[in-house]
Amino acid sequence: MGKCLVTKLTGTVNNDSLPKLGVVIIPIRPMKDSANINFRSTKEGSVTLKVYDNNKTLKGTYKSSTSEQHYINIHLPNGGYLEYDNKYDVVSDFYGNTRMAGREALPDIEEFKYCKNCLEVASLFMKCNVKELAEFDWITSFEATYFTGDFTDYIARRVEKGISSGSINVRVFQGGAPETFVNGTIQINGIKVNFNTWSSPMGKLVWESADKYYLLNDGHTSAYIHGYSSEEIQAMKESGQPFEKVSSPIEV
């Protein structure tokens, strides 16, 4: 066996702001009322959630569950943050019904690049251009209120990746507490998408190609359509699916 030179250096790191492997931090605005978080993981107890106030005082430590009905209740009157120690095992959203501390303070989508167990993505806990979500093959639905960009770019990227046709569940709503409402900028082929109401069922983004697609929105009562002839649209309305509740499709 050959010889090698090993140099050991001593040092101390005192920077608490350095990112930690597998850890994600979600900032929280001051909360008037308490809120529930659905805290679900792939394995029982595989994720620890720590809740801190804005003075970095630990307010609670919780273990995840595999149950879809596993909720924890938090209340941070002066704001604070949530710290997940194993983001890769989280199944449900990272936020529940909490109030995020503004889009610019949220972690970038890159922090969730390998969170392949989180099938549902909400823009309340990350910031990104919707096109970037096209790289996340495992996502089955997303809420796009705080995302930027254009759904058409998302579709184009999926087609480039070989998914020539497909669909994904989508909701665009005005979310959060009144003081955190934002003007959504999400578009489809350059047209701003109207907000859903919170209680509306999930919409759906469907594409047959990069040049033929539609977005069902607001409880499937509105639709943004591109690349379909008037005859095709009428036939789709008459068939009962998918435009049976749509009165006036918006061509984009």
Image (cartoon, rainbow, N blue to C red):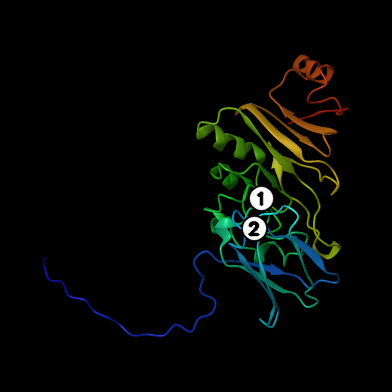
Q: SS class of the residue under badge 1? A: strand
Q: Is residue 102 above or below residue 199?
A: below
Q: Quadrant of the N terminus?
A: bottom left
Q: Is residue 136 above or below residue 163?
A: below
Q: Quadrant of the C terminus?
A: top right
Which callout, 1 or 2, points at the residue further toward the start of the chain?
A: 1
Instruction: Please name whichever residue, 124 or 247, is drawn nearer the observer in this view of the structure.
Output: 124
Q: Is residue 49 left or right of residue 160?
A: right
Q: SS class of the residue under badge 2? A: loop
Q: Position of residue 87 (x, y in %)?
A: 57, 60
Q: Is residue 222 left or right of residue 42?
A: right
Q: Position of residue 247 (x, y in %)?
A: 88, 27
Q: Label 1 is placed on what type of residue?
A: Val
Occupied quadrant, residue 220? top right
In front: label 1 or label 2? 1
Q: Position of residue 81 (x, y in %)?
A: 68, 72
Circles 1 and 2: CB distance less than 8 Å?
A: yes
Q: Is residue 34 above or below residue 196?
A: below
Residue occupied by mark 2: 126
Residue occupied by mark 1: 121
- At horizontal 85% and vertical 25% (from top left) the residue drawn is 244
Residue 241 got which mark? Answer: none
Q: Label 2 is placed on what type of residue?
A: Met
Give the mark count. Answer: 2
Residue 190 in view (yes/no): no
Q: Position of residue 197 (x, y in %)?
A: 86, 47
Q: Give the alpha-carbon distance from disc 1 to disc 2, as whole Å.
A: 9 Å
Crowdedness of circle 1 by 10 Å Cα count: few (<14), some, many (20+)?
many
Residue 239 in view (yes/no): yes
- At horizontal 78% and vertical 78% (from top left) the residue drawn is 78
Q: Is residue 221 left or right of residue 144?
A: right
Q: Is residue 195 left or right of residue 126?
A: right
